[in-house]
Amino acid sequence: MTDYNFAYLDEQTKRMIRRTILKGLAIPGYQVPFASREMPMPYGWGTGGVQVSAAVLTPDDTLKVIDQGADDTTNAVSIRRFFQKTAGVAVTEATAQASVIQTRHRIPEQDLREDQIIVYQVPIPEPLRFLEPSEVETRKMHSLEEYGLMHVKLYEDISQHGDIATAYAYPVKVEGRYVMDPSPIPKFDNPKLEMAGIQLFGAGREQRIYAIPPYTQVVSLDFDDYPFQPTKADHACGLCGAHDSYLDELIVDDEGGRVFMCSDTDYCATRRRAGHVGTHGTPFEEDAA
Amino acid sequence: MYVAVKGGERAIDNAHAWLAEERRGDPSVAELSVAQIREQLSLAVNRVMAEGSLYDPNLAALAIKQSRGDLIEAIFLIRAYRTTLPRFGGSNPVDTETMACDRRVSATFKDAPGGQVLGPTFDYTHRLLDFKLAADGEAGEVQTAPPHDARTPHIMSYLDREGLIQPEASDDAPPPDLTRSPLELPAARALRLQALTRADEGFILGMAYSTQRGYARNHAFVAELRIGAVAVEVDIPELGFAIEIGEITVTECETVNQFQGSKTQPPQFTRGYGLVFGMTERKAISMALVDRALRWKELGEDNLGAPAQDEEFVLYHSDNIQATGFLEHIKLPHYVDFQSELELIRKLRRDAQANMQEAAE
Amino acid sequence: MTPLLQVENIAKFYGARIGCADVSFDLYPGEVMGIVGESGSGKSTLLNCLAGHLVPDRGAVRFDTRTGGLRNTVTMSEPERRMLGRTDWAFVHQHARDGLRMNVSAGGNVGERLMAVNARHYAEIRTQAIDWLGRVEIMADRIDDRPTAFSGGMQQRLQIARNLVTGPRLVFMDEPTGGLDVSVQARLLDLLRGLVREMRLSAIIVTHDLAVVRLLADRLMVMKDGHVVETGLTDQVLDDPQHAYTQLLVSSVLQV
C-alpha cells in the first residue's frame, strides 16, 4: 500500500480547494463551486468538511472533531481517526486547545479565537433548495438578490403556526448581501456565527464551499415584529447545571423519564472539572470508557 | 444517576472485526480468490469498472471481494482509489471503427458488412436455472472459426453517406472532466455523456424505459451494438507520435431516432450514443436512449416535461455514490436538530392550546 | 414628453411564418393601449416580445427607466430585465395559475413583491395584503387560503393584487378576462378600470374581446396575420372602422 500525501489529498487538489476557500472568504456567504473528490467516506458523511480540513491542516495543527457537539459519536471518531492516520496531527477534545475544529451540526459553546478555524459539514448548501428545486434558478436568485421567496416562507409559517417554524439550518443574511444556510445547526447557535474565528463550510456531494471571515455581520432572517429568537430547552444540564448551553434530551427509563445534558461534551466536562454539579450528576471523575 | 455514554471508538473496532468475519463467511467453505471473481463474475467486474470510472479488472475484482458482493460499495472503493492516482495525461479518443468485434448486431438492417455476430450473449438463452452448474461449470468444447480480418465499418456510416443522419457537431477542444471540475448547468453533450457512462445502471435503465413508455417518446432503433477490444493510444510529445499503451474492451451502442418538428430542415435521423467499459450492454443501450432524450433542446424539440428530458434531474441523481452516501447519511445521529424540532413543536402546541382556551372563554 | 414605452419595428418569425412584423408605437404614462385580433393574429406573440418573454428577431423596445432614461429592454441583460419585472413592470397572465404561487396563501402571494423590496414588518405586510385584497374585492378572511381554494374570478383578482401592490408603472395583460363567466368579467373590468385610473397606470392589454378594449383602452391596435391593420383612438376605431378587417370584427360582435 502506498503512503498517503499529508492529509490524504494530493497537493494539486489542496491548491484547488484553497483557491476556492479564498474566493469564499472574499465573498462572504457566496457558494463557490468546486470539484469535490471522492473520499474514503461516503458522500453525505462529511466529505466536504474533510476536504476543507485536509486543505487547511498543517503538521503543527491540533484537530478537534465533533458531531452533535460530542467528540465520541461514531462519525466524529471515524473522521478524527482518518486524519490521525493520514496527517498524523495532534488531536484534542478541548475546544480551547484546537486550532482546527471540524463539526457536524453544532458550534461549540465556548467562544472561538482569531487563531482558530471551524469547518462545518454541510448536507444541502442551498437555503432556497426546498422552495425552488432547480439549481439553475437558485443561482440566478442569488446573483440578483431575489430573496422574496425566503421571506414568503417565513410569512407562511407565521400565518399558519403563529411563529417562524424553522428550528435548525435557520437562514441568515451575511454582510447584508448573500442569504446563506449555516448548515443544520440548531437556531440556538446562530448568534455564534458572528465570531473571531474563521468559518469554512464544505458541501462535498453538492460541490460547494462557502465561508465567513472573522467579525462578519451575520443576521438571522426574521420580521421586525417577529424577531429571531435563539431558543433552547427550558432546562439546565443535569450533569453540570449549565443554563446557557444547548441540551440533549435523553430518555432514561421505561416510564419516559428524561434527563437533559449539554450537547457540547467538552463544555460540560470543563464545567464539571471546575466543580459544577447538576441535579443528576456526581462530582467529576473520568467517565467510564 | 446518569453517566454519560461513551465508547464510540470501541464500538467501531468491534463492528469492523465482525464485518471481516462476515465477509469470510463459513471458514469451512473455500475462500473466494480475486482471480475467480475476475474470471467468473466478469459482468460484475465490468459494472464496477464502468461506474468506478477505472479500467482495471483485477482492482475491480478485489473491490467486489472486499465489499462482499455489494457492487455499489465496490464502486465506491474504486472511486476512492481513483482519487489518489496521479494523472499523466489523456489518451486519444478510442477508434471504435477499428474494434475487433466479439459481438456486433444491428436491428436496422438484416445484414451488413461485418455480419450479425451474436457473440457470447444471454439473449437467446432460456432463463431456466441450470442445476447442473451447481456441480459442474466446465464449458466444454466450443467450435472456432478463423478470425475475420476485414474491418467492421459502422452501420451509421452507410446512413450517413445518404445524408440521412444529422451531422454531429464536431469539436476538437478537450472535453471537460467531470471528476476535476464541478458539474455546472447547462451541461454540454460531452459532459452529459461522461456523467451517463459512470451513472448507476439501474437509474439509467429506469430513465431509458420511461422514454420508451411515453415520457418523451422517441422510438429508438438500435443501429448498432458492438462489443470488443480497442487500442488506447497516448501522444508522446518527445517521440512526436502516439503509442499504444494497452487495450480495453468497450461496448458501443448507436441508436437512430426520427427527427421531428424542425423549423427549416427536412427530416433526418438523429442519434443517441452510449459507450461503456467492458461488456456492459444494458447500460450502453440505456445510455443511448437517455442521451437522445436529453438532446431535445439542441434538436429543436418540445420539452414534454418528461423526467428523462430534465438535465438537472437526470445528472444530479444519476451518480450512485452520491445517492447512496446521502441516502445512508440519515442513519447518522440527527438528535440535535430533532431536539430543536421537539422544542419548537412543543412551543407551537402550547401557543395553540392557549389560543383555543382564550377563544373558549 | 418622453414616452414610457417606445416600440420600434418589432418582428418575430417562426421559420417562414410571421409571428408579428413591423409593429411600432409609443405609449405615454397613464395611457392604456389595447391590441385586438382573432386567434393567430400575432397579438400574444407581440405582447410576449414586448414583455421580454420572447426574444424578437428584429426591433427595439425602449422603456423609460427610473435611473437610466430610455433603455432598449431587448438588449438588456437578463438580471436587469428580471429586476424590471419585479419593480416597474407587471404581467397579468390569462390563466391565474401562471401568475400566482398556487402553494402559497393569498396573503403570501400579495406580500411577496413587498418582501422582495425589503418589507420586514409582518403585521404591516399583512395589513397591506388585506387592504389590497379588499381593493380587488376579496374578503379579508380569505387571506390565509391558498389560491386553489378560490374561484377563477377570485384567482384572477388575486393575480391583479399581487402585481399591483408595489405600484408598477407599466402593466401587460394577456386576455385578463379570458375563460371567466360574463358577470365575473364585467366585475373584473370595472375593477381594472378603477385601478388603472386611480394608480395612473400605463397598460398594454391583449384581447379578442372588443368590449374589454371599449371599457379599458384609450387607444387601439387591430392585428391580422401578424400585422397591424388599423390603429387609433378606441372610440374612433370601434365607431368608425376604416379597414375591412376591423369592420368585420366590429360587425361580428353579437348584440344582445
Image (cartoon, coloured by chain):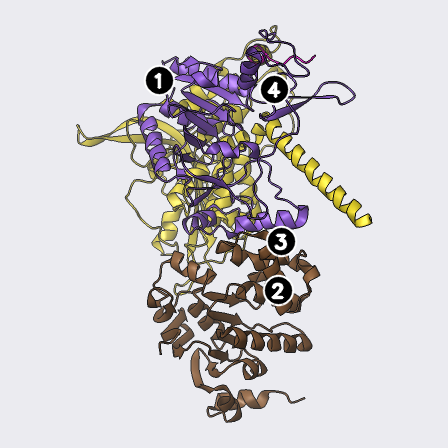
Chain colours: A purple, B yellow, C brown
Question: Residue under mark 1: which chain is it in?
Answer: A
Identify the secondary structure beneath mark 4: helix
Find disc 1 in the rendering and name its residue.
A6
**Residue B295 percent location from the top left of the image:** 44, 51
Please determine if labels 1 and 2 lie on a single subunit.
no
The reply to whether the C-beta atoms of the residues labelled 1 and 3 are less than 8 Å apart is no
Question: Residue under mark 3: which chain is it in?
Answer: C
Q: Nearer the viewer, residue C10 or B312?
A: C10
- Looking at numbered disc 1 in the image, what kind of residue is underneath it? Phe
**Residue B121 percent location from the top left of the image:** 52, 32
Q: Quadrant of the N terminus of chain A?
A: top left
Q: Which mark is residue C103?
A: 3
Question: Residue under mark 4: which chain is it in?
Answer: B
Please determine if labels 4 and 1 lie on a single subunit.
no
Find disc 4 in the rendering and name its residue.
B133
Say if B329 sits above or below C183 in the image: above
Q: Determine the residue positioned at 57% across, 51% down.
A: A152
Identify the secondary structure beneath mark 1: loop
Please determine if labels 2 and 3 lie on a single subunit.
yes
- Looking at numbered disc 2 in the image, what kind of residue is underneath it? Asp
**Residue B178 percent location from the top left of the image:** 39, 36
Q: Nearer the viewer, mark 1 or mark 3?
A: 3
Left or right: B64 in relation to C9: right
Q: Quadrant of the C terminus of chain A?
A: top right
Residue B238 visible? The answer is yes
Identify the secondary structure beneath mark 2: helix
Q: Which mark is residue C131?
A: 2
B8 magenta-colored:
yes
Q: Nearer the viewer, mark 4 or mark 2?
A: 2
Residue B108 visible? The answer is no
Look at the image and give the residue range highlighted in magenta.
B1-11
Q: What's the CA distance linking mark 1 and mark 3? A: 51 Å
